[in-house]
Amino acid sequence: MTTGKRKAKATQESLHRIFTIPEAPESTLGLIEKEISENLAGFLGNHIVATEKPLTDIEQDFACSQIPEEPEFVSDHMHHLLDKLISQSVHTSSPSFIGHMTSALPYFILPLSKLMVGLNQNLVKIETSKAFTPLERQVLGMIHRLVYRDEEDFYQRWMHSANHSLGAFCSGGTVANLTALWVARNNLLKPDGDFKGIAREGLFKALKHYDCDGLAILVSERGHYSLKKSADVLGIGQESVIAIPTDEDNRIDCQLLRQKCRELTENNIKILSIVGVAGTTETGNIDPLNEMADIAGEYGCHFHVDAAWGGATLLSEKYRPLLNGIERADSVTIDAHKQMYVPMGAGLVVFKNPSSVTAIEHHAEYILRKGSKDLGSHTLEGSRPGMAMLVYASLHIISRPGYEMLINQGIEKAAYFAGIINQHPEFELISEPELCLLTYRYVPPGIQELLRNGSQEQQQEINGLLGKLTKFIQKRQRENGKSFVSRTRIEVSRYGGEKILVFRVVLANPLTSKEILHDILQEQTELAQESENFYPQLKAML
Ligand SMILES: *Cc1c(COP(=O)(O)O)cnc(C)c1O
């Protein structure tokens, strides 16, 4: 455009314009709006440059720390954004982007999000959200019912009750987990006689009053790092999160869990919560929730289930039984922005007992008055957007059976991918998929036999080289920009618990075809041979 010729000025009139007059349809922003409305995938495909540019180069475009003294015209600024930002963002909705939990969104989300922003409701209180508050309470009720399946009259009684809440809507799984553990902590160290409770008197006095030497959170070694952050924020320290080893299927070893509970109790440490993972972030496996609920019952402690990613599986009648026992949890985290195809910023935690949240209730004089139905009185976050509307709309537009199809399709696609990996002589499946997530790695021909029959020392050497090769392939594939898988390091019991670098894929995008999966393996096989160090070194071992 005419960058450099026209100059924008900050005047009363120009400021008034940006609040009152929309961008013209033929303006740059107007055209972008039209394009993304009509063909988002096409727009992203056209504007995101797929090939890798070093981050240090990109940083040069974001190097100035001064707030501009001169305003820009919207159109000029749009060109700037297209050039510097959008071109260098990540095409998360591409069907061959199968490396993370962030995937494609249904089309209706786009105009609905715009409407949500336009309405700009603040869910902290009714005065700034009105109908959005009952809507959010209903969404919490729906998810609560999905998890706990209570009777109709339970929901009629509690869903809109001022002094209760069936859960808390928040920005994501991290805050949801923190909220659950906050509730657990405050209920464990509750007011008692002269002691006014941990919420008012703090951890130091609480431990003294209850005459205990510490608190612990128990979760499998596959637990999400947000639990450690929570322990840190809650004042009990990251080392209070105790990682219990898993079996060969990445599920918590309940015998070791029970043993640890006994040991802690004998050492005068209180168990703040046992946390089950329903869909681990790295391998997608589900803990034995029923058995964990039994153990939590024996020790009378809070049982939380982190189903941030896997919780949406409850929408599938066919695969729901994989999460059996979840209905016995005191609290459950589910992220709508993972497998419910809602954009980021939508997590929630539901509580079995509608009174649980009174443990974290806060009031303020000008808002959140006692007895009000303001949602902000029991959420960690203050001002919050109307994201619940997007969950509400998705649940209506897609409906439970629609979600079931999406979920089942993902799980079955992962099983298919595992099948072709298993049949392929040059790939090794590392974790068998339970849901739509699996891990695997490339292994040059002949090396798998060597691994199977070699000594532990040989295995370690080979695994070390394979790790470097995996990293090489993963980086090259990302740089080439055609497809993307992620990588992680996990302990693998078949190699004596050694930590191994693996590819990780999440098959949630309904547009990811079987053909794409075959192509990804093909590309990885070819990339492996481009490795000038690790591939020949491995071959030389034969
Ligand atoms: C993603 C995830 C979280 C964290 O959720 P965010 O929305 O990223 O904050 C917690 N637990 C599990 C199991 C997850 O997969």
Image (tube, grey):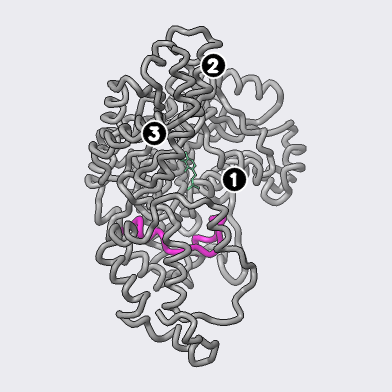
Nearer to me, 514 or 208 = 514
Residue 160 place in picture, x, y as percent: 41, 58
Residue at the spot of label 1: 182
Tell me what residue is drawn at x 26 percent, y 45 percent. Answer: 510
Mark 2: which amino acid? Gln
| Quadrant where the image shows the C terminus | top left
- The part of the chain drawn in magenta is 372-393
Mark 1: which amino acid? Trp
In the displayed structure image, the side of residue 234 where residue 417 appears, left or right: left
Residue 20 place in picture, x, y as percent: 41, 86
SS of the residue at dot 3? Answer: helix
Using the image, determine if residue 96 lies above or below residue 264. Answer: below
Q: Mark 3 or 1 closer to N-term?
A: 1
Q: Quadrant of residue 291?
A: top left
| Quadrant where the image shows the N terminus | bottom left
In the displayed structure image, the side of residue 142 where residue 252 appears, left or right: right
SS of the residue at dot 1? Answer: helix
Nearer to me, 39 or 107 = 39
Q: Is mark 3 within 8 Å of ligand 1?
A: no
Q: CA distance from mark 3 to mark 2?
A: 23 Å
Nearer to me, 134 or 77 = 77
Residue 308 place in picture, x, y as percent: 44, 42
Instruction: Please give the label number shown on residue 527.
Output: 3
Q: CA distance from mark 3 to mark 1?
A: 47 Å
Q: Is residue 505 visible?
A: yes
Q: Is mark 2 within 8 Å of ligand 1?
A: no
Q: CA distance from mark 2 to mark 1?
A: 42 Å
